[in-house]
Amino acid sequence: MSTLLMTMSWWFYRFQKVKLVRLPQAHLQKLDLSAPESLTSEVFREKLEAAGISLYEPDNVYKVPASHSLKNSQENITCRPLTQADEEIFTAFCADISEQDLDDAWVELDHWVVYGLFIDGKLAVASSLYPFRDSKLADLGVVTTPALRGKGLAKILVSYAHEQMQERDYFLQYRSQLDNLKSIGLAESMGLELVGQFEGEKTED
């Protein structure tokens, strides 16, 4: 299987579905990567083990496909940014959602950018974003009030967020643990495209 180590220094790509590993520059210097044309995934992992570098379990990484476009045609649905001025609205919204779902979604009003979808003036879906490392990628979290799930509302809000982020030259990404079937199902329901897996280096707290 062909592979390529990018000059950015900390991305390892394995083609078919892309596999990414993030490493700091100092750790790359411990690895012998002088022949990237012969570097397979298996060889790369052997080099990591020999250098004493451990990785977290991989996450699935999804993106909004280029063809993704969902224009809202319902007059009673609006999308807009949420700010601290919406704290009361957001608190009431969260009260209808289980603590586990809130933890899984990790949508917070004080995140970098927050968007909401309203139906007849009531918050139904919330999505927050935060820059991924020092890249132009923005991690996406989204949660819908239980009574309105399965109606395609999250997809509408993600489309709105995608358009807003494009204006800032950012790209949305959604990450899910491989065994989180609910999260994977949400990604599929929102029309997101699986592009590969990401593994980060384990670090001491």
Image: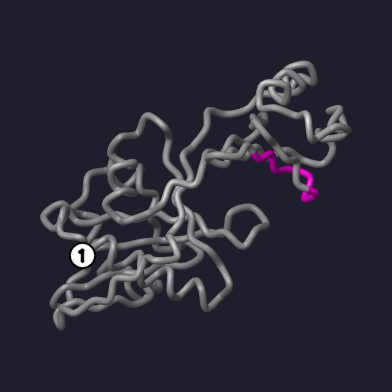
| 165 w.r.t. 76: above or below | above
Could you tell me which secondary element the residue under label 1 belongs to? strand
Please report the residue visible at 41 percent of the width from the left and 61 percent of the height from the top: 128
The front one of 65 and 176 is 65
Question: Magenta stretch mostly in which secondary structure?
Answer: loop
Q: Which residue is mark 1?
A: 124
| Residue segment shown in magenta | 7-13
User: Which sits in the foreground, 195 or 201?
Assistant: 195
Q: How many marks?
A: 1
| Quarter occupied by residue 114 | bottom left
Q: Is residue 105 left or right of residue 23?
A: left
Left or right: 115 in relation to 11: left
Q: Position of residue 71 (x, y in %)?
A: 27, 76
Q: Nearer the viewer, residue 145 or 149?
A: 149
The furthest residue to the bottom: 75
For the N terminus, the quadrant is top right
Where residue 70 appears, as percent x and y from the top left, is 29, 71
Say which residue appears at 45% left-offset and 65% top-offset. Answer: 66
Give the residue displayed 79% in from the left and 35% down from the top.
Answer: 37
What amino acid is at disc 1?
Ala
Q: Position of residue 84 (x, y in %)?
A: 40, 72
Rendered location of residue 150, percent (x, y): 16, 53
Say which quadrant the C terminus sits in: top right
Closer-to-camera residue (110/118): 118
Quadrant in the rendering for residue 18: top right
Residue 143 lies left or right of residue 18; in this view the side is: left
Asked whether 124 falls inside the magenta stretch, the response is no
**Is residue 114 left or right of 92 when viewed as pictured?**
right
Q: Residues within 10 Å of mark 1 (few under 14, many from 20)?
A: many
Q: Is residue 112 above or below residue 77?
A: above
| Quarter where residue 157 is shown | bottom left
138 w.r.t. 70: above or below: above
